[in-house]
Image: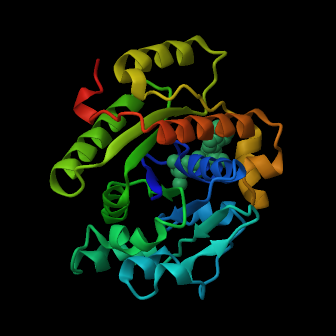
């Protein structure tokens, strides 16, 4: 059965979509069957893989509404082992439409159940909000991976997210684990970044991913070419860092390492 990893942080611009695209691509490049689900109405993960705006294309919106089965919304990508469920602008309305629906928090979980046998990993790119789309993603997920920048105030937002994870565990999805916190756009040449990183290490302990994602212009350029970094510039530091992160994620999954609950995260 595939492992579902939601990439979440209610703050925008922290590297969620970049992480979702490049982690999913790196898992696929390691010959691990992987599905990326774009759950953000902005559709950046879809366009970053070369899927421009096409109003007629089926998307995660139809999946959530139950108007198309999972098998009809899958798209093949340039990487053999990577498939995509793209997003669409219709998702903007989904937050309101979902409120009225039965099992509104479980729509995505129910819809992707049949896909879990076909993929070893299912990566979900969440919108920058703690809304019903993110809630559906976290209820569908086995774990949550939190990208964050090494800034002092970033910790407040992440604490709020971890409180939400705890509430979701209590109410909807007791199995939801914290995959880890990954530092993005990291600049290890500055003293500030290094001191924040060591403080985060003492706060998150084991949950802080060993891999840090450097600030790397190739990661920012690749989406405009519709490619993950490993196809755009495979030798770039950005591409290599996500390949390393994917190895960390695969190893953890295959070792079935113990996850810890958010309340145990403070050492
Ligand atoms: P989010 O999905 O959390 O809003 P994005 O992944 O879209 O964040 O990243 C925000 C912006 O920062 C984008 O323009 C992206 O290309 C850029 N970016 C993300 N990660 C990096 C990185 N490691 N190095 C350089 N630019 C990055
Ligand atoms: Mg995004």
Find residue 62 and report its horizontal and vertical position in percent: 45, 82
Front residue of 118 and 174: 118
Q: Is residue 191 visible?
A: yes
Q: Is residue 9 visible?
A: no
**8 over 205 or under it: above or below:** below
Find residue 121 and report its horizontal and vertical position in percent: 53, 55
Q: Residue at x 69, y 62 (%)?
A: 49
Front residue of 87 and 25: 25
Q: How many labels does the image show?
A: 0
Front residue of 16 and 42: 16
Q: Quadrant of the N terminus?
A: bottom left
Horizontally, residue 199 falls left or right of residue 175, namely right
Q: Which residue is drawn at 43% across and 18% down?
A: 201
Find residue 152 and report its horizontal and vertical position in percent: 42, 23
Q: Quadrant of the C terminus?
A: top left
Q: In which quarter of the image is residue 203?
A: top left
Q: Which residue is drawn at 35% across and 37% down?
A: 157
**177 over 2 or under it: above or below:** above
**109 over 197 or under it: above or below:** below
Horizontally, residue 150 falls left or right of residue 66, namely right
Farthest residue toward the left?
171
Q: Residue at x 65, y 39 (%)?
A: 242
Find residue 238 and report its horizontal and vertical position in percent: 72, 37
Q: In which quarter of the image is residue 241?
A: top right
Q: Report the coloring of the rendering.
A: rainbow
- Quadrant containing ligand 1: top right
């Amino acid at each position: 059965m595939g492992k579902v990893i939601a990439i979440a942080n209610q703050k925008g611009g922290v590297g969620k979509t970049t992480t979702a695209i490049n982690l999913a691509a790196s898992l696929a490049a390691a010959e691990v069957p992987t599905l990326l689900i774009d759950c953000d109405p902005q559709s950046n993960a879809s366009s970053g893989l070369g899927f421009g705006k096409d109003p007629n294309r089926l998307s995660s919106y139809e999946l959530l509404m139950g108007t198309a089965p999972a098998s009809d919304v899958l798209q093949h990508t340039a990487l053999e082992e990577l498939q995509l469920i793209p997003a669409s602008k219709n998702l903007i309305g989904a937050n309101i439409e979902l409120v009225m629906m039965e099992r509104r928090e479980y729509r995505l979980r129910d819809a992707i159940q049949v896909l879990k046998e076909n993929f070893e990993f299912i990566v979900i790119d969440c919108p920058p909000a703690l809304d019903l789309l993110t809630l559906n993603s976290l209820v569908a997920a086995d774990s949550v991976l939190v990208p964050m920048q090494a800034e002092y105030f970033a910790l407040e937002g992440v604490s709020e997210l971890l409180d939400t994870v705890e509430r979701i565990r209590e109410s909807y999805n007791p199995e939801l684990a914290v995959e880890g916190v990954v530092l993005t756009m990291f600049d290890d040449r500055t003293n500030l970044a290094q001191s924040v990183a060591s403080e985060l290490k003492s706060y998150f302990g084991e949950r802080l991913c060993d891999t840090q994602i450097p600030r790397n212009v190739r990661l920012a350029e690749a989406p405009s070419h519709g490619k993950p970094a490993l196809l755009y510039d495979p030798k770039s530091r950005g591409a290599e860092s996500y390949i390393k992160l994917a190895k960390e994620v695969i190893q953890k999954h295959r070792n079935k390492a113990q996850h810890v609950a958010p309340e145990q995260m403070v050492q």
